[in-house]
Image (cartoon, rainbow, N blue to C red):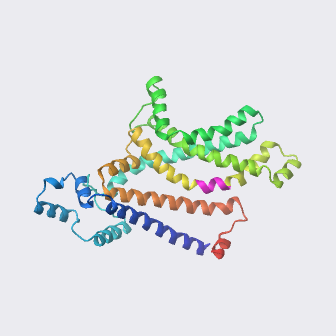
């Protein structure tokens, strides 16, 4: 186990380094001058500057140094948790993220919980019900949830529950009522994907020999599905749960923009528009760290669901 954890931590370091490096390199691969991009983010138009003023502006933001020198400075700062200062907002990046991350974490946590409940419930009912039309509906419903764009779901919810019924606010960051529509909008795509995978896994698991044996012992269909099938059918679902972190990051950008919420997603959208590279780099690394952490936790949960899975065997095989 220690060897396995050490290997995974080493992989995590590589992933975070790659995320930081790719974000930095993309800036210099854009079909424009990276210096002009960053100075434009600071509100400085290079066309209106003299040569001396341009040199002074470059020196102020550290853009007069060689690219590798800038990269090393940013990387060493990131290792110590310092991503520098926002070029557009002129405040430390850590402060910007700290001010906004709380709302996004609350939104993501509630949406994740709702997605698990909805996805598991739909997949379980699809495998349990005997009424053919209802079973077909429950089987097809997740595909619809995946196909409909997130922003369209959000706009439809706003139109109906805010404008027509007047039950919930359409935008803003406030009390629990401001969370309802964003949470539903964010949870539906993830719930649909979970239901798709879990539903197929249920169908395969219910054909296994131990399920037949459990039924032969006199257990009811509900007991068989809940006590035996669900536990084993959940393994493939855990595999894609890590991928849903990426979906969550993307959804947060869309949802917080549609509902005008102050969070990391909206900060990312604002920073990309003005090309505020230090902020974008910090958000990318933060998202990568969340992805790595969730996948590590999922790997550690596998042996609890299936005792046949051992990390020692995996480590030896590697």
Predominant SS along the magenta part: helix
- Displayed quadrant of residue 277: bottom left
- The picture places residue 192, in percent across and down from the top left corner, at 59, 43
For residue 274: magenta?
no
Magenta-highlighted residues: 235-240
Query: What residue is drawn where x is 18% and y is 65%?
Result: 59
Q: Nearer the viewer, residue 35 or 7?
A: 35
Residue placed furthest toward the top:
164
Query: What residue is drawn where x is 63% and y is 37%?
Result: 141
- Displayed quadrant of residue 191: top right
- The picture places residue 255, in percent across and down from the top left corner, at 44, 42
- The picture places residue 116, in percent across and down from the top left corner, at 60, 46
Q: Is residue 160 above or below residue 51?
A: above
Is residue 95 left or right of 64 when viewed as pictured? right
Query: What residue is drawn where x is 56% and y is 56%?
Result: 242
Is residue 74 left or right of 157 when viewed as pictured? left
- The picture places residue 129, in percent across and down from the top left corner, at 75, 37
Q: Quadrant of the N terminus?
A: bottom right
Query: What residue is drawn where x is 71% and y is 61%?
Result: 306
Q: Quadrant of the C terminus?
A: bottom right
Is residue 305 left or right of 218 when viewed as pictured? left
Q: Nearer the viewer, residue 292 or 38?
A: 38
Is residue 241 left or right of 101 when viewed as pictured? right
């Amino acid at each position: 186990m220690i060897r396995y954890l050490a290997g995974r931590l080493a992989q995590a370091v590589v992933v975070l380094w790659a995320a930081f490096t790719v974000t930095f390199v993309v800036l210099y691969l854009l079909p424009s001058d990276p210096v002009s991009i960053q100075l434009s983010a600071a509100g400085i138009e290079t066309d209106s500057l003299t040569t001396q003023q341009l040199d002074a502006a470059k020196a102020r933001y550290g853009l007069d140094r060689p690219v590798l020198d800038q990269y090393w400075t940013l990387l060493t700062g990131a290792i110590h948790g310092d991503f520098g200062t926002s070029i557009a907002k002129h405040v430390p990046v850590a402060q910007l993220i700290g001010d906004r991350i709380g709302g996004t974490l609350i939104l993501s946590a509630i949406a994740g919980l709702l997605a698990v409940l909805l996805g598991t419930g739909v997949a379980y009912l699809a495998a349990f019900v005997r009424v053919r039309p209802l079973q077909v509906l429950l089987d097809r419903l997740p595909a619809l949830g995946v196909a409909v764009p997130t922003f369209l779901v959000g706009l439809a919810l706003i139109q109906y529950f805010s404008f027509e019924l007047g039950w919930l606010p359409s935008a803003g960051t406030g009390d629990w009522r401001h969370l309802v529509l964003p949470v539903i909008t964010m949870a539906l795509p993830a719930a649909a994907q979970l239901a798709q995978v879990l539903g197929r896994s249920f169908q395969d698991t219910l054909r296994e020999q131990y399920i037949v044996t459990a039924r032969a012992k006199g257990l009811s269909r509900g007991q068989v599905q809940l006590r035996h099938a669900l536990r084993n059918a959940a393994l493939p679902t855990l595999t894609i749960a890590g991928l849903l972190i990426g979906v969550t990051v993307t959804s947060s950008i869309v949802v917080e923009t549609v509902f005008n919420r102050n969070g990391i997603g909206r900060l990312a959208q604002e920073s990309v528009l003005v090309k505020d590279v230090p902020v974008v780099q910090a958000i990318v690394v933060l998202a990568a760290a969340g992805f790595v952490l969730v996948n590590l936790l999922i790997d550690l949960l596998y042996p609890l669901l299936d005792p046949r899975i051992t990390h020692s065997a995996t480590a030896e095989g590697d």
